[in-house]
Image: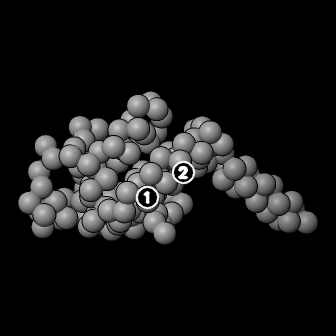
Amino acid sequence: MRYLITLIAMLGLVQSVQAQQPVRVVMHLQSNDTLVHRSIVNQISNMKKEIPDAEIAVVCHGPGMDFLLNTKSTYINRLEKMKLTNVSFIGCEFTMKQRNLSKNDLVPYASTVPYALVDIVKKQQENWIYVKLGF
């Protein structure tokens, strides 16, 4: 009986700790479609309204790197002007090398990782929620 009570108490503790974990979302962008880019502004804005303390990482690679480029930064600049907290924009260095891009080609608030998909997998292993962006 004591074992059962201890087990129930431990399960309650685990559920309590899990309920207190912050929401962390990794958004995967592989599209250069400007309609998708416009949609990202709305999706992130809505998420931050409903879950203000959510941590959001937008990970871009392939054609999705266009979202982070200085020359095509219309939609990402809208997000930056909103001054949202805990929102990061991450580019793929492998894609950058293939496309002959440098960090200077990206908006100044973007960071990079060696491989976008590896970063996404690592985040999922850390219990980030995965969202594929695009139509």
Among the two numbered marks 2 and 1 on one chain, the one whose residue lies closer to the N terminus: 1
Up-down: is 1 above or below 74? below
Residue type marked 1: Leu
Q: How many marks?
A: 2
Give the image's coloring scheme. Answer: one colour
Up-down: is 26 above or below 83? below
Cα distance in 3D space between marks 2 and 1: 12 Å
State the residue at coordinates (59%, 46%). 47
41 to the left or right of 95: right
> Looking at the picture, how far across and down is residue 13, in whole percent?
73, 51
Q: Nearer the viewer, mark 2 or mark 1?
A: 1
Q: Residue furthest left?
A: 100
State the residue at coordinates (62%, 39%). 49
Q: Which mark is residue 127?
A: none
Q: Residue furthest right?
A: 1
Screen quadrant of the N terminus: bottom right
Q: Residues within 10 Å of mark 1 (few under 14, many from 20)?
A: few
**Tag 2 secondary structure:** helix
State the residue at coordinates (69%, 50%). 19
State the residue at coordinates (27%, 56%). 66
Residue 23 visible in the snapshot: yes
105 to the left or right of 122: left
Query: Closest to the observer: 111 or 8?
Result: 111
| Residue 76 falls in image quadrant | top left
Q: Which mark is residue 43?
A: 2
**Tag 1 secondary structure:** helix
> Looking at the picture, how far across and down is residue 21, in whole percent?
61, 48
Q: Residues within 10 Å of mark 2 (few under 14, many from 20)?
A: few
Which residue bears the numbered disc 1? 35
Residues marked 2 and 1 touching at CB (< 8 Å) = no
Residue type marked 2: Gln
